[in-house]
Amino acid sequence: MNNLWGDSLSGFWSAWIIVITLGSIGIAFWLLYANRKTDKTPDAEGNVETTGHAADGIEEYDNPLPRWWLQLYIGTIVFSLGYLVLYPGLGNFAGVLGWTQEGQWEEEVARAEERFTPIFAQYEEVPIPELAEDDEAMQVAERIYLNNCAVCHGSNAKGGYGFPNLTDDDWLYGGEPENILTTLHQGRNGLMPSWQQLGSENIENVTQHVLALSDLEHDADRAERGAATFASVCAACHMPDGTGNQALGAPNLTNDIWLYQAPGQSVADSVRQTLRNGRNGHMPAQAAYIGEERVHLVAAYVYSLRFED
């Protein structure tokens, strides 16, 4: 109840829930009690009148409830009342056991921390390149990755639209252990501003120049005209030769790897969209969520991905 309604309910709503809950149980018991027997008695041959209900030639006889069924139903009512005495379920009444889902979660987390923290601490002392070669450690790290990172980067770590592929050698901020640790500890915020002010002609020229940087099919005349614009507005981040700048997280534009190319979208359309609208990328810091020692393991796992066949 606390998760749904806050720390506690007002007196009215607490009473309302208690009345509805106990009233429902009471009505169920009354229906059970009222139908425990019938006033019809069998005739001399043991036949009983029907209720008048029939379906597909099958008639419903006016017999009392089977005793086993009645006892089972009474058992469920007794169980429900006992449960509501022991556990929370009646408004603000916490139950005589004082159980809460938050308390149980905290106990389970505490047990897990007590069991696994020493193991993680041992792994944290191992340098990342060495740890990346430990198969047992990487099995543990993979589970942490799948629970916390796969939702964005994919279970195969190959990323998706707007989420980097972690299995290749194209790293926005560098793929060395210290770079990966910084990303996991501090997060990353990438910003590509919109260049609408360039006008449609210049945007198209720069698009063709970017295509030329990756040796993709392009309009040579427009690419040549776009080179000057690229040098004045893009080179500060992406470098004059378009190879990018890992200090800024500016992508390499010469390797035909495109973070924001949607399925079925051409590279040219993706580049045009980026120039017109800009891009915003956010990688949240993970240390606060998974703990420092797990960050070290995940960093080693990510580092190991590039060496897989």
Image (cartoon, grey):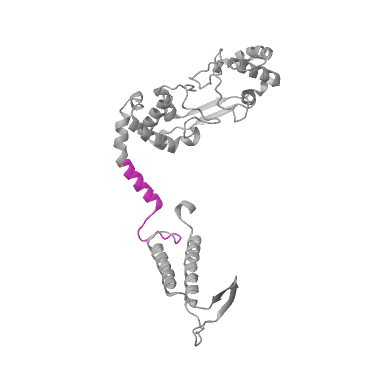
Quadrant of res 228: top right
Q: Which residue is drawn at 42% across and 37% down?
A: 289
Residue 108 falls left or right of residue 257: left
Q: Residue at x 41, y 21 (%)?
A: 176
Q: Is residue 142 above or below residue 60?
A: above
Q: Which residue is drawn at 32% across and 45% down?
A: 111
Which residue extends farthest bottom? 44
Q: Which percent across, then down, holds residue 86?
A: 37, 61
Q: In this view, does 292 lie above or below 25?
A: above
Residue 197 falls left or right of residue 142: right
Quadrant of res 290: top left
Quadrant of res 193: top right
Is there any visible trace of residue 18 in the rendered image? yes
Q: Which percent across, then down, holds residue 267?
A: 61, 23
Q: Is residue 227 above or below residue 41?
A: above
Residue range highlighted in magenta: 90-113
Is there any visible trace of residue 7 in the rendered image? no
Quadrant including the C terminus: top left
Residue 57 falls left or right of residue 45: right
Q: Which percent across, then down, holds residue 242?
A: 56, 15
